């Protein structure tokens, strides 16, 4: 199995995870490399809500098995739709995907900054259906917004345990205030690791079979589902 080293040699990172199939081999690789991931499920692109819950439950099942902490972001498909408005008919790997990656990774970077986790990676980079340049550009843009002096407007940090997913997002009382300051001098580095190399693509498929993961046939949003001929 591929051994990796996180930027700066840090021992704990935030891993934005899109689903269990894309996360299995990546989590194994991080564990075997001595890196402790905090998994962040921020995927408001997924529709309908039942599909979102199914993908989350599969990931939760695996992180519980590994003893890895899983944090669930707020699900806000309406906000995601606003972020991609006008791009609904874009093809896969088009501008809609770019906007989608920016939306999700910005939230992940802000959570990493609030938690004091210095490195952000994403399992989006493990899928052969994704454009790595788009993913990496969105990740770099996301972490740039965590520089000192910026203010996050995404909600309030929740505590968590390793055994169950924790929601992270605004509560009713937070909505009116709408923002909270990031820690001073906070920066997060994006880790543009290609999670398809070093045997990880092959191991990905093995983990899916071993764990019997639900293996979806589209990225997540209603537009990608409509464009996939398998779902016609």
Image (tube, rainbow, N blue to C red):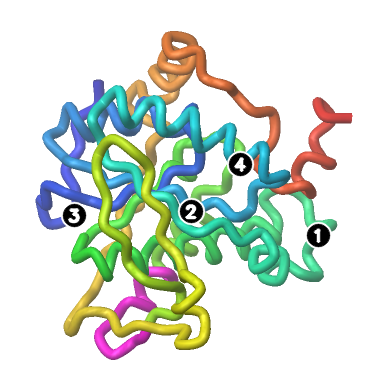
Q: Which residue is mark 2?
A: 42
Kindly state the secondary structure of the residue where label 4 is placed: helix
Report the magenta residues as a range.
Answer: 141-151
Residue sitting nearer the eye, 31 or 211:
211
Residue sitting nearer the eye, 21 or 190:
21
- The answer for how far apart the CA atoms under marks 2 and 4 are is 10 Å
Query: Is there a contact, CB below 8 Å, between mark 1 and mark 2?
Result: no
Numbered disc in front, either 3 or 2: 2
Magenta run includes residue 142: yes
Which comes before the other along the chain, label 3 or label 1?
A: 3
Numbered disc in front, either 1 or 4: 4
Which comes before the other along the chain, label 1 or label 4?
A: 4
Q: Which residue is mark 1?
A: 88
Kindly state the secondary structure of the residue where label 3 is placed: helix
What x and y, as percent, mark residue 221?
A: 71, 48
What x and y, as percent, mark residue 90?
A: 79, 57
Q: Which mark is residue 52?
A: 4
Q: Which mark is residue 7?
A: 3
Which comes before the other along the chain, label 2 or label 4?
A: 2
The residue sitting at 29% across, 52% down in the picture is 14
- The answer for how far apart the CA atoms under marks 4 and 3 are is 31 Å
Label 1: few (<14), some or many (≥20) within 10 Å?
Answer: some
């Amino acid at each position: 199995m591929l051994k990796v080293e996180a930027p700066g040699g840090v021992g704990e990172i935030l891993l934005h995870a899109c689903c269990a199939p894309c996360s299995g081999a990546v989590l194994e690789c991080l564990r075997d490399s001595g890196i402790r991931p905090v998994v962040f499920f921020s995927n408001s692109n997924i529709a309908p809500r039942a599909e979102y819950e199914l993908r989350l439950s599969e990931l939760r099942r695996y992180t519980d098995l590994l003893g890895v902490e899983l944090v669930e972001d707020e699900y806000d498909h309406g906000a995601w739709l606003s972020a991609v408005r006008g791009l609904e008919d874009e093809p896969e790997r088009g501008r809609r995907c770019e906007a989608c990656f920016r939306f999700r990774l910005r939230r992940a970077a802000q959570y990493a900054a609030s938690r004091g986790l210095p490195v952000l990676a994403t399992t989006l980079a493990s899928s052969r259906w994704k454009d790595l340049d788009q993913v990496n550009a969105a990740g770099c843009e996301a972490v740039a917004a965590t520089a000192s002096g910026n203010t996050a407007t995404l909600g309030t940090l929740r505590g968590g345990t390793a055994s169950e997913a924790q929601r992270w997002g605004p509560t009713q009382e937070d909505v009116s205030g709408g923002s909270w300051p990031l820690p001073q001098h906070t920066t997060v580095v994006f880790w543009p690791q290609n999670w398809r190399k070093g045997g990880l693509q092959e191991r990905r498929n093995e983990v899916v079979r071993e764990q019997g993961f639900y293996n979806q046939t589209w990225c997540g949003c209603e537009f990608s589902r409509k464009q996939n001929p398998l779902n016609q």
